[in-house]
Amino acid sequence: MFAVVALVFSYLSAKQRREELQVFALSRGWRYELEQPRLVDRFTGAPFGIGFGRRAYNVLYGSHDGRDLVAFDYEYKTQTSNGKQTTTQVHRLSVLGLSMGVPMPTLRVDPENFLDRFVGRISGTDIDLESEEFNRAFTVSCPDRKFASDVLHPQMMEYLLQHRQLGWRFERDSMLMISTGGRTPSQIDATLAVMDGISDRVPEFVWLRLKGLG
């Protein structure tokens, strides 16, 4: 009986979320898609490419302040075994991607222990910056140390410390923010505001250099 009640509750919750996002998309002039398999391989790095049964669904396509955006629920499964019984765990996350309009080195800024939720700490990849408080709060990885230090200047670090629960990355031509669970419309708006704050604080000379003009 409990299993039936849980199944019905899960169905109704999923239905309510779909309807909520459809209304939200319509109010913004965005497009809603129930599922989009191509997004499963659109980005790289944890949590993408992990596990099996990967899905991208409840997809929103739109524009924010002149930038293309995509928001979607992402799901993958992992299995553990004790030798007698195999247990399947479903991991559900929310992905929000905002186009930056120019290719960039991959820069990851994750709250401490964020990566441990997916694949564990990869030793030797951290970049330490001038602020010890920032280094304690975040793990930074980037193949281009100068790019990382140019982007993560003191004013940027101060801003990020006000949002130390949020992880983000630059990848290809986009900024990504990934969180556990599913974002509500108000949480999508709040996340976009933080993403604006980050992109606005990237120095102009960095954007010019990325465009080949500096």
Image (spheres, helix red, strand yellow):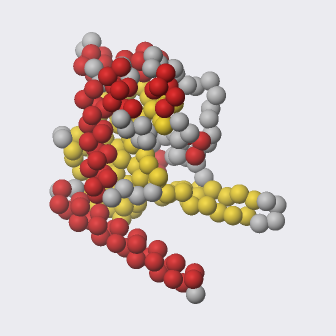
Left or right: where 159 falls relative to 8: left
Q: For this view, does 29 lie left or right of residue 212?
A: left
Residue 204 horizontal/vertical position (percent) = 24, 19
The answer to which quarter of the image holds residue 213 is: top left
Residue 103 seen by the camera:
no
Q: Position of residue 18 (x, y in %)?
A: 34, 68
Say which residue appears at 52% left-offset and 28% top-offset.
Answer: 136
Extreme-top residue of the structure: 214
State which quarter of the image contains the C terminus. Answer: top left
Residue occupying the point 81% across, 65% down? 84
Asked if residue 148 is positioned above or below residue 14 in the image, the reply reads: above
Please tell me in which quadrant of the rendered image residue 150 appears. Answer: top left
Q: Looking at the image, which residue is at 40% across and 49% down?
A: 95
Q: Which residue in the rendered view is the most extreme toward the bottom?
A: 1
Left or right? Give the position of 197 relative to 41. left
**In-front residue for pair 129/121:** 129
Tally of numbered discs:
0
Question: From what the image shows, is residue 20 above or below residue 97?
Answer: below
Taking the image as shown, residue 116 lies to the left or right of residue 191, namely: right
Estimate the x, y position of residue 197 in percent, counting from the top left: 27, 34
Nearer to the camera, 65 or 35: 65
- Kindly indicate the quadrant of the structure image that contains residue 3: bottom right
Residue at 22%, 56% in the rendered image: 30
Q: Is residue 149 visible?
A: yes
55 to 99, vertically: above or below: below
Which residue is at the front of the view, 186 or 172?
186
Question: If the image is split into quadrants, where does the N terminus sit?
Answer: bottom right
Report the residue that reaches farthest toward the right: 83
